[in-house]
Amino acid sequence: MSTGLEETSDAETVDVTEAELEALIGDRALARDEHENAPGFVVNPDEVQSVLGDLKDEAGYDHLSCVTAQQYEDRYESIYHLKKYDDASDEVSIVVPTTRDDPVSESAEPVFRTADWHEREAYDLVGIEYADHPDLRRILLPETWQGHPLSDDYDQDKPQLVTLAEHENPLADDHHDAESDTMFLNVGPHHPATHGVLHVKTVLDGETIVDVDPDIGYLHRCEEQMCQQGTYRHQIMPYPDRWDYVSSGLLNEWAYARAIEDLADIEVPEYAQVIRTMGAELCRIASHMLALGTFALDVYGEFTAIFQYTFRDREVVQDILEDLTGQRMMFNYFRVGGVAWDLPEPREEFFEQTRDFLDELPAKVAEYNDMVTSNEIFQTRCIDTGVLEPDVAKDYGCTGPVARGSGVDYDLRRDDPYGYYEHLDWDVVTRDGCDNYARVLCRMEEVEESAKIIEQCLDLLEEWPEDDREVQANVPRTLKPDAGSEIYRAVEAAKGELGIYIRSDGTDKPGRFKIRSPCFSNLQALPEMTEGEYIPDLVASLGSLDIVLGEVDR
Amino acid sequence: MIGLLKSMATTMKHALDGSTFTVEYPKTAPDVSPRFRGVHKWSQERCIWCRQCENVCPNDTIQIVMDDQRNGEQYNLHIGQCIYCRLCEEVCPTDAILLTQNFEFTGDTKQDLVYNKEQLKSVPWYKDIDPLESREPDRGAWIGEGEGEVDYQ
Amino acid sequence: MNTAPTPLQSDTVLLPELIGDLTGIAEFGVAGELLAAFIGAFIVGSLMLAMTGIAGPWAKRKITAAFTDRIAVNHLGPGGILVIVADSVRLLSKENIIPEDADRPAYDLAPIIIAGSALLGFAVIPMGSGIHLADPEVGLVYVFAVAGIASVGLMMAGYASGNKYSMLGGLRAVAQNIAYEIPLVVTGMSVVLFAGSLRMSEIVAVQNETTLFTIPGLEWAIPAWFALVNPFAFVLFLIANFAEVGRNPFDMPEAPAELVAGYQTEYSSVYFVLVYLGEFLHIFLGGAIITTIFLGGPAGPGPAELGIVWFIIKIWSVFLLTQWLRSAIPRVRIDHLIEIGWKGLLVLSFANLFLTAAIVGVIQ
């Protein structure tokens, strides 16, 4: 099998029609399964690798965006959502059913490295086993957990006692060797540089990192299940704010809004789309400011000036967002079919406040450049550390500034347009340094691009005719999409591709709600970036990945 | 070397201009936006006990107890559990439940944060801001003309 | 304004003798001298500890806040200065948690060594206004020697804590101190070539007795402070000193973002206070050494009695510089640090030494 590092030439990535896909998969397709977003092919569980391999090499589907697992009454199902890095709107889903008695399916890991964690999560939460998987352990729950929480026969009332000592599998091999020259070091779960409760199992040779194994799940809050228990119309919307909780709330809300609007066929008024676009970009600025500040914190140490300056500027954005949405971080501003409110009155004041911020932004960015990027010590710390080659980034399903810092030109705002982005004039920022420095620069330039977008949105909003300011579409009070309809929709969140998969079971609550978190996929690449480097580089690489554990663990 | 000196010059500039962006919090009360969502305030006079707020609440924060004649008896709200999504205010047809701008409240135990009717009534306004004025709630979205079934309690 | 710096004689009366004479206890022979020495040491120690007390809980916060556009402590007393009291009560009343794996008594000794080594160094520093405890012939060597003991303390703290992060911190401290001790001492020696003596009082005297040049028209005589005579050596010494006391950008042994405060991770309560005090004492000792051998010691405009004021101003400027660097400059990586030490500073410091030797030889 391929190692998944083959380059697909542009010639192969030109539009593949459904007929060609059918021909490519041929007899291996047992049936067709239409998803709202993409054609689906049902495939035998022992032909996953060959089908995915062909799709990747022959048809150019080089981005395994997400793996969704779910249980039906009669079967388990894994869905591989494939996309192209060159054309994100060209999607295909591979559906792999397995029986209830013997839920074993072939692993996609040899084709796409990113399937490693996604399949572990599917195993952990739903209970599908993947043959050939290199390391099929639980990922979000403790290793001693009993049962698979998203499966039908799981007893939610049964108490699970997991003591600290039992957190790890007591039967696991002990590799401790008194003669060895290496040292095992737990970085986290409580460590200043892990930005939350991330546990990185590190093996050190001196200060050089030999092996890194991120251990996640400390902040697992059953977000998917919580959404499955809420009604489409209102109860799900407050939760996306809490996935990536550092001020990218509106971007997350948009992911859900986009998925449900496409599933239930709701047309959003243009005026609302402009407000959404503006709010989302404000969030992106706030989020990138925080990323820059905390990255500086990791590299500079302690609470240095740059962290405070970015927070001061982020504060301004938060004030604007508070005026707009009513909350500083947990916005709950989007509604299915629009937004909750129009701009705050008096509108002139809001425009003035936002424009003031945009006017001051270039000076502030210049100040950051003075302090951070032009600093020689900063450059020696960041250039050529945490290197992530573009091929590796694609293989791990990296998106967002992490991929763009590695020269992968992939931005859903442009490639799979939504909202008002396609009518606005802005650029996708890419950098081909592939290192920590490139990722930082990428974020800083994205801030400027976002400012450009906000500026244009403000102009539009200011001139919008007063009698046409419709903020919400007419949406039924109870949403019940057709039973069995499935959709996977993604938006460009601050950290990358944030995707939502929803399967409707005909009721007013989702049958399956799956979150494709960008941080989850990006974090997977950490070992590739840090092995062979020093502890400070590990800390810097973690910072430049800009993960939020709330989103990784969900 | 130039970069290092530039960094140092920037911080020194900030040190010398003497401006600060933090607030002396307990001394100066911060300005909150008129749309800000804080602790709930509830009005018994207005409440028609339709239980829509209880129904829409995403995480069962509101608990309403009624007698067999559908007269309201208790209205409990677990502030410690609330996620301040404001859906209860949005759904309320009579503006009986509102989210004030008040964000200053504490409790020694979880139990202290379970507010009953009386406590909810006596929640103070923050700086005398009336939240309704700034929010102009869009009830149209709730009644709607769509075909979805209307589920009255 | 009196422009000529006050010359200091190398045979100034030392503080213990002064106390002995003033109080009359010198008449009691050796016991009296001993008592006088203790009183002198007590005065100097209290002075230094008081400065650390101001610097640690209060000044550091205020300075950092100024750089980062914040207000910092301002509730207790004028400008929040009484936070010092609050902090000391808080720190001293906390439980002293000693980890199970701690290797005692090394664990208990380390904080004392870290704080004590710095205090010892002040014994030979001439602080002006007659405050000078001892003036041995090998003063400069002595001060480098006792300051170097601190790395033993750091290593002990790192090893005895029984924590991997502390261990790494301790190892880094040793690697760093070895790499920077040599350039530090070698650069210090270039000063000795100018002064022709290791005795602290003479080094100070030489700087102030010679006039570098006079600004014409103003009749301001600029004294031959070695920072002005050999700025290159001054910069080298400053950098090596920051590395030696583990300040930004060389705060490797602590590196909170990487090693979670390194060697001091496991220290709490009184021990933490000692470690923290030791850290600040070392910054001040570094400042005192720089002041003495490069900035003319306690000399400054005005009467000689103001010496101690000038001295304190000078060492606080060095402290201010450390805080300034802390706010603006990223931490270098450990391998870069060692590289800068061995490949850069060491070579430069020897070059400086030879150059100085040649120049001094030619002049003489």
Image (spheres, coloured by chain):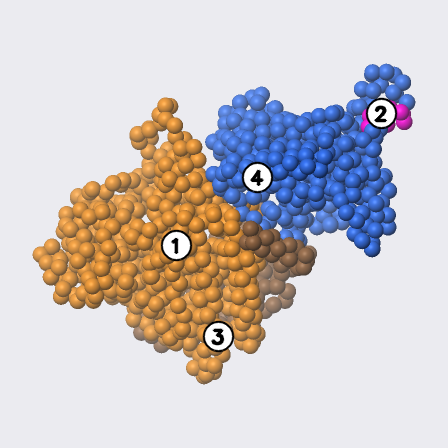
Chain colours: A orange, B brown, C blue
Evaluate if marks 4 and 1 touch, with contact meaning CB atoms under 8 Å apart. Answer: no
Name the residue beneath numbered marker 1.
Answer: A433
Task: List the single residue furthest toward the left.
Answer: A27
Evaluate if marks 1 and 3 touch, with contact meaning CB atoms under 8 Å apart. Answer: no
Residue type marked 1 = Gly
Label 4 residue SS: helix
Our reading of the magenta stretch's main secondary structure is helix
Name the residue beneath numbered marker 2.
Answer: C17
Bounds of the magenta segment: C14-23
Q: Position of residue C43 (x, y in %)?
A: 79, 30
Asked if badges 1 and 2 are on one and the same chain, I answer no
Residue B2 is inside the magenta segment: no
Q: For residue A458, which numbered disc appears in the image? A: 3
Residue type marked 2 = Glu
Residue type marked 3 = Leu
Find the distance from the CA under tag 1 to the CA under tag 2.
Answer: 67 Å
Find the distance from the CA under tag 2 to the CA under tag 4.
Answer: 42 Å
Residue type marked 4 = Leu
Estimate how packed mark 3 is, as few (under 14), some (14 to 19) or many (20 or more) residues with alpha carbons within 10 Å: some
Name the residue beneath numbered marker 4.
Answer: C348
Instruction: Name the residue at 62% across, 35% down.
Output: C353
Choose between A324 and A409: the one closer to the eye. Answer: A409
Residue C17 is inside the magenta segment: yes
Find the distance from the CA under tag 4 to the CA under tag 1.
Answer: 33 Å
Choose between B16 and B116: the one closer to the eye. Answer: B16
Asked if badges 2 and 4 are on one and the same chain, I answer yes
- A187 is higher (above) or lower (below) than A319: above
Choose between A399 and C305: the one closer to the eye. Answer: C305
Q: Nearer the viewer, mark 1 or mark 3?
A: 1
Instruction: Name the residue at 37% across, 33% down.
Output: A166
Label 1 residue SS: loop
